[in-house]
């Protein structure tokens, strides 16, 4: 019998792809089979070599003046979650989200380098906020796209080997084929599949201890690649996790576009949103694919989220031209300009856990 069925946790009765079926796929591909954004053409990188020359000649990014805050993880709380939902920042875009007895990981990366050729490439500035061996049993993993700072091969291999059976991996279209080729134990077809590929606007459902948890894969403006030769051969997107008691949105990596307004119309009013705030300089190059903190605040307001947590910053040095400590300063200015409080749009230390209740007042 498949290990997935042996796990008591995964007597969850997962109902897959309840929403728009594959026959009514929401994403589109060009003549070469490469996925396309809805509101912009990111089929090619514009000015990459010019950017690399400038950052090399100017010595960018500059070293941070303030270290990214780090706290020891509260393992007792992580293994016995509190409130209606609980959030722990592992670092960069890696998040542990806990809801109704389920332990969900988003974009887990435990690698020291976010790079295909370590030790070259962006290096981790501090250890992951929860040591891998201290994670609770993970029920589901959500991947936003296949960039190395969001999808790490060794991390997903380790998760596939976790005790008491692997999690179910929810991935964008095409990333399931990568799992099948590179991750032992991956099953992408059949009754017992544990890697579920989803298109934009599709949804799935897994059962919580008390209520069903709805999973929606939603379009945002970005791109995908793991080499110079496979640009946009797999899809990218954001995740909405909707439970009767608490509604959560995970941005992944994105640029501000009409996609955010589309999400707001269809799903807006989230209780909590994890919104990228880093990797945004230089704007002339990054604007098409990454928000800056002012656009992160605009995203928060457009989505009508009650509270937000800034992610995708302070972890891997060298992904962009701003220093690791610049995003919090720019976010503070953007929040002040918009009249947004620290309780409404917050930053956590690496390893920090926050518990939330739907009735919680962000002004408290």
Image (tube, grey):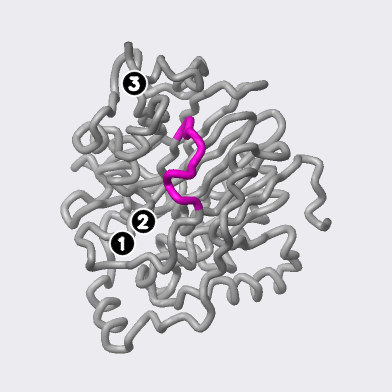
Above or below 329: residue 241? above
Name the residue nearer the viewer: 238 or 21. 238
Give the mark toward the camera: 3 or 1: 1
Image spot of residue 110 (x, y percent) = 38, 52
Report if residue 133 lies within the magenta region. Answer: yes
**Helix, strand or loop for the magenta stretch, by majority:** loop
The residue lying furthest to the left in this view is: 229
Judging by the rendered image, the residue that carries numbered circle 2 is: 149
Residue at 32 percent of width and 86 percent of height: 59
Above or below 111: residue 97? above
CA gap, disc 3 to disc 1?
Answer: 30 Å
Judging by the rendered image, the residue that carries numbered circle 3 is: 193
Q: Residues within 10 Å of mark 1 (few under 14, many from 20)?
A: many
Q: Earlier in the sequence, mark 2 or mark 3?
A: 2
Q: Earlier in the sequence, mark 3 or mark 1?
A: 1
Q: Which residues are magenta?
A: 130-140
Image spot of residue 270 (x, y percent) = 67, 43
CA gap, disc 2 to disc 3?
Answer: 25 Å
């Amino acid at each position: 019998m498949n290990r997935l069925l042996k796990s008591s946790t995964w007597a969850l009765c997962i109902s897959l792809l309840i929403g728009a079926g594959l026959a009514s796929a929401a994403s589109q591909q060009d003549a070469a089979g490469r996925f396309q954004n809805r509101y912009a053409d990111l089929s090619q990188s514009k000015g990459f070599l010019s950017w690399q020359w400038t950052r090399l000649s100017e010595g960018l990014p500059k070293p941070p003046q303030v270290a990214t805050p780090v706290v020891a993880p509260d393992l007792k709380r992580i293994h016995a979650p509190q409130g209606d939902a609980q959030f722990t920042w592992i670092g960069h875009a890696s998040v542990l989200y806990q809801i109704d007895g389920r332990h969900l990981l988003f974009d887990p990366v435990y690698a020291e380098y976010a790079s295909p050729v370590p030790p070259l490439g962006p290096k981790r500035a501090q250890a992951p906020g929860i040591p891998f061996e201290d994670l609770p049993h993970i029920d589901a993993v959500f991947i936003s796209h296949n960039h190395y700072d969001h999808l790490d091969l060794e991390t997903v291999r380790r998760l596939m080997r976790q005790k008491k059976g692997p999690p179910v991996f929810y991935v964008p279209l095409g990333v399931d084929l990568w799992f099948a080729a590179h991750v032992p134990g991956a099953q992408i077809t059949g009754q017992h599949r544990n890697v579920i590929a989803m298109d934009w606007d599709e949804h799935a459902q897994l059962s919580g201890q008390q209520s069903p948890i709805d999973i929606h894969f939603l379009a945002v403006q970005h791109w995908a690649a793991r080499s110079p030769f496979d640009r946009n051969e797999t899809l990218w997107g954001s995740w909405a996790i909707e439970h009767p008691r608490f509604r959560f949105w995970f941005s992944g990596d994105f640029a501000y576009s009409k996609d955010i307004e589309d999400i707001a119309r269809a799903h807006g009013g989230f209780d909590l949103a994890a919104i990228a705030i880093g990797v945004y300089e230089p704007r002339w190059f990054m604007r098409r694919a990454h928000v800056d903190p002012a656009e992160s605040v605009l995203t928060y307001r457009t989505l009508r989220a009650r509270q937000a947590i800034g992610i995708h910053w302070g972890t891997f040095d060298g992904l962009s031209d701003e220093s690791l400590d610049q995003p919090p300063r720019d976010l503070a200015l953007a929040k002040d300009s918009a009249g947004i409080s620290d309780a409404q749009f917050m930053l956590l230390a690496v390893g920090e856990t926050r518990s939330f209740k739907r009735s919680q007042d962000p002004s408290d």
